[in-house]
Image: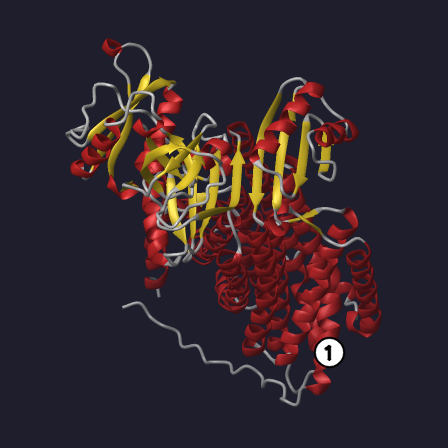
Amino acid sequence: MLRAPVWRAVTALAVIAISLILALVSAPRLGLDLRGGTQLVFETRDSPTVKADSAATDRALDVLRQRADALGVVDPTLVRSGERRIIVELPGVLDPRQAAEVIGRTAQLAFHPVLGGGSDARGEGDARGERVLRDENGGQLRLGPAAITGDGIADAVERSDPQRGPGWWVSIDFRDAGAWQRMSGAAACEPVGDPRRRIAIVLDDEVISSPPLDPSVPCRTGIPGGSADITGSFTHGEARDLAVLIKGGALPVPLTIVEQRTVGPTLGAAAIDASAKAAIAGLVLTAAFIVAVYRMSGLLSTLALACYGLISYAALVAMGATFTLPGLAGFVLAIGMAIDANVLVFERAREEYDQGRRGLKAALDRGFRNAWSAIADSNVTTLIAAGLLFWLASGPVKGFGVTLAVGVLASLVSAMLITRVLAHAVIGRVGPRLSGLGSPGAVRTWLARRNPQLMKAGRLWLAVAGTLVAAAVAGLLARGLNFGVEFTGGRLVEFATAKPLSADVAGQAVSRAGFPSAVVQASGDGVTVRAGGLGLDDVARIEQELERQAGEVTKRSEEFVGPSLGQELRRNALLALGVAVSMQLAYLAVRFRWTFGAAAVLALLVDVTVVAGMFAWLGKPVDGIFLAAMLTIVGYSVNDKVVVFDRVRELWSSRRPFVTAVNSAILQTMPRTVNTGLGALFILLALMAFGGDSLRDFALALVTGIVTGTLSSAFVAGPLAVWLARYDRKPPPGPPVKRRRVSGAMV
């Protein structure tokens, strides 16, 4: 009899100890939106000779990695995403123009002999491979076919030596010393000052350097040893950039930037600070609420909740997961969701004790046993939503999906293992009142006394829901959704100004920079500019115009999404919502009856439509954060309906009408619904109070979704299930078989 509790206690201690060790020895990996830097997403394109497959993308990745390392970026991250995309993260690099110019050059590097000055600059070649290009000073050169390609470069590095005088130069090492000696020897035969004595280094059909050979280089002998120096009045930065471009060599296929994000370090630090405040405030409010409702049991679940936070954090750092701003929001939100399993158990234990079934420990055991079905079903639906976020979302929103999934699994360990161990150690040694399980609670007592027949007004509730949906659809049709740059493509830049600017003044400054159609928003000391076709040089012009009006201007963040990627992300968002709803319907149909699943999904569509309509009426941006909120609403809303229909299945039998079973199930699960919803709302209110604009919109969507999801479980899903029951020919389940308990004995 004592074996199971002992093993549970040992397992709980082992999980906590391992989590504590991992949390202490592993450092968290912060995303660029928290530590500052630039993220570039490149997409490979087919060239006339090479197909952009995974092998070509891997070769391009190697070249980009050499360029990033040579640029001196601390801890750069470069990974291939899919077959054709490369994600480059450059911490500390806040100038996207520099990053794109040096790392993202899409060219084929080559060394060309100069055949003379050109007569035009069209860059067109002839049958012999000759072409005319402008040099780095604007002059024209006629170039012969490439003599050495980027693959022939072994190394290139910037150097300086006080003994040789001030300044920097670039030192190049060639793999084929003979090829370089022949090329330089041929050029050395030309007179000093003749263009033909120069060597042109061409990148992306652009001459990045065309230095002449030193007069000391002998004709035909050339430069031996397989090395050469490019001298000139270089600054350190110019010499380094030139060395990076030469060393990077030839990309096997062209690259195009399809996404770019830049975040300043101060914005990341503010996001971490805001998330920490939200987590602390939400945890304190949730703990105070749960202790006030469930007394000692609530205190024990709060301790388990702290262990949940430790387990979640340890699992994320052990996985090497990247903490992003949406991920932190998911971590904070999961605190409220983690309390759901505890509330389910405690409410079932209260019911068991109120029905006079043995003592507190026995009621608690039956509470854990009877609540497991609803807990498992509700967590599966949330995991479906988290998996879709990771599969179809882009950028930092993937971090939200990972955090949400880890939080769900950690909450199961927290509630079903740690809370159970703590409760078994304490409950039974305190009185029923102090335990928090000896009384049914204020909500349950009020419902039992009133016993409202909610299903009698089913048509009225459906009419109210239909009115809300109609208002939401009217907003969607009349105003449309304000899709963010993530879904439409374009560039979004946020500036911090030394003094506040009005939207009109900021808009005029942006118009003078050449973008009268840009969407400009101003609030406090911030100005946000969004437009399609906005290049990096254009951003610099806008910044200069704003400085004339507001003094010092600092770029807080910048986001660019190419039009093709924007269409793909928008398509993936719709696909994610469609797949989420379909999978929830399929899961519920298998787990319950098809009528239950259809009623739950129709109610879910009401929740989603109301939230989308509210965002349309308010003009709030619809972006990846909104997608994360919508899929979370899907998971939460279905959770609530799973709990209700799980109780319907338990109460319904041939001796009890279906409508009565539905009404009783709603009333019996109402305390759990109210307490869980309030726990989540405390967290979301903390996010609204301390989070930035994006997290505030995220919290607003979730608050609306939780309120509508809670109400729709009773007033939409219930009446719909009653209405659909007339089409269900499957008989009601039989009464549960009571097993005879045999008392054990200690030997």
- Viewer-nearest residue: 40 or 247: 247
Q: Is residue 266 visible?
A: yes
Q: Residue at x 58, y 77 (%)?
A: 589
Where's residue 150, x and y in %? 30, 41
Q: Residue at x 60, y 76 (%)?
A: 650
The image shows a total of numbered marks equal to 1
Dot 1, crowdedness within 10 Å: few (<14), some or many (≥20)?
many
- Viewer-nearest residue: 279 or 288: 279
Screen quadrant of the N terminus: bottom left
- Decide if residue 615 is on the left or right side of residue 259: right
Tell me: residue 89, above or below residue 403.
above
- Viewer-nearest residue: 250 or 342: 250
- Decide if residue 550 is on the left or right side of residue 84: right
Screen quadrant of the C terminus: bottom left
Q: Residue at x 48, y 28 (%)?
A: 138
Instruction: Tell me the element at label 1.
Output: helix
Say which quarter of the image contains residue 64.
Answer: top left
Where's residue 93, x and y in %? 45, 31
- Decide if residue 649 is on the left or right side of residue 746: right
Tell me: residue 129, above or below residue 393.
above
Circle 1 residue: 722
Q: Amino acid at mark 1?
A: Val
